[in-house]
Image (tube, rainbow, N blue to C red):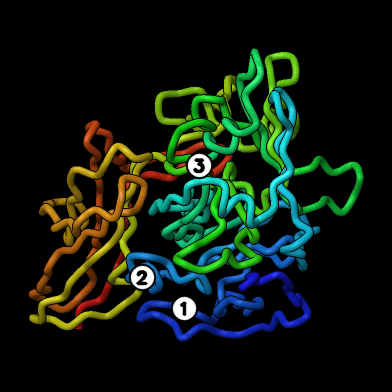
Amino acid sequence: MLGPAALALSACQRDQPAGGAGMDLSRDHWMRFPGKVPLRLLTDRPPQLETPLHYFQQDFTPNEAFFVRWHLAGIPTYVDPIAFRLTVEGQVRKPLELSIDDIKRKFEPVKLAAVNQCSGNSRSYFDPPVPGGQWRHGAMGNAMWTGARMKDVLAAAGLGAGAIEASFRGLDEAPLVTTPAFEKSLPLEKVVDPDTIIAYEMNGEALPLLNGYPMRLIVPGWYATYWVKALRRVTVRTAETKLKNFWMEKAYRIPNTPDGGEDPEKLDEDTVPINKFSVRSVIVKPEPAERVRVGQVYEAQGLAMDSGVGIRTVEVSTDGGKSWGEAQLDAPLGRYAWRRWRMQWRPERAGSYDIRARATNEAGQGQSERYWNHGGYMRNVIERVSVEAV
């Protein structure tokens, strides 16, 4: 099977999902792209498509429901799996041109469960509001990725003297020559981390074209801006050839503070490229505006994640933060995967309930009541959902 080599964008159509209990379909636009269920549409050029919350009741997000985020309008709509080559160049002793079969056969295949999360996931909840894609909580997904270790590929090329980083570029193209190509770089220690891989399968199937077919970079525990899709070129760089472009020096930068946050009234001038996940928990069930039954046991559940340190506890409040109880954690799916939490709750009276969740990882890092930066990145506040008991 050669995989999803062609994408007929003319087949895109407006649609509505078979929604979850609390979904308000009236104020959203939904689009069914080829190979996808109806997803919440932010933009169509380039595609930005958000996963409905109810899909997160599954441990691994289905490929057809996995969120989509491209930066340039010229996304690949066809990839010839026979002619495709991944080039490895720059400060290496032996430049490589690798076919899809080369990647699969010449390098040991590894599997890795990991969350892919957009840097701006949940941006629409920032207060005060910030510009950018107004994602809710659905700009993320958890998948089992299969691929080759980046360190093994670079070992085959042979790192040259003075290598300090590698940059990564995909098949997407800018509509104008003045638009900078989307290329990202990582420090060498992250590039050769055994868990950094070039994935060619997602949940046991070839990558969907919209999610990066034929292969994409997987940088577990780091935000998705580095997970370059439709990867076609790896360039090893020295201090003299270090990547200096819009996507590293202007975009996706956070305040150089311990948590990446800043004061809306006093923006930080000292910034660094975004990197590791912050600790966060998302309430998956109940959904916003969902109704529950008075006197009946209801299982609230959600997801907690961090950069790979590991989630220690998740606490849940059903009274707006006045009191907290520890939730039950499901068995880990992997250090970079999300951790599902559950709590049995019996509403005793009719009316509104303010449900909140907060996670703490093994390093003692947790969530706060308020968090803000001007990019709308790395949200890790204590999330809340209002539900009605009837």
Task: Mark 3 and mark 2 in contact? Answer it, CB < 8 Å.
Answer: no
- Measured from the top left, where is residue 47 in percent x and y? 68, 64
Sequence-first tag of 3 and 2 = 3
* Residue at image mark 1: 24
- Going 17% across and 56% down the picture, which residue do you hit? 329
Q: Horizontal placement of 304 versus 278: left or right? A: left
**SS category of the residue bearing label 3:** strand
- Left or right position of 12 against 369: right
In terms of depth relative to the viewer, which is nearer, 304 or 182? 182
Identity, as a three-letter code, of the amino acid under mark 3:
Arg
- Residue 231: % across, % down: 67, 49
Helix, strand, or loop for circle 2? Answer: loop
Q: Is residue 287 above or below residue 45?
A: below
> Are discs 1 and 2 less than 8 Å apart at CB?
yes
Q: Are there few (<14), some (14-19), or many (20+) residues within 10 Å of tag 3?
A: many
As drawn, which residue projects farthest toward the front? 106
Closer to viewer: mark 3 or mark 2: 3
SS type, badge 1: loop
- The residue indicated by pointer 2 is 288
Residue under label 3, please give it.
Answer: 149
> What residue appears at the point 75 percent right and 56 percent down from the top-left corner?
84
Residue type at mark 2?
Pro
Q: Residues within 10 Å of mark 1 (few under 14, many from 20)?
A: few
Q: Earlier in the sequence, mark 3 or mark 1?
A: 1
Query: For this view, does 60 lie left or right of residue 286?
Result: right
The answer for how far apart the CA atoms under marks 1 and 2 are is 9 Å
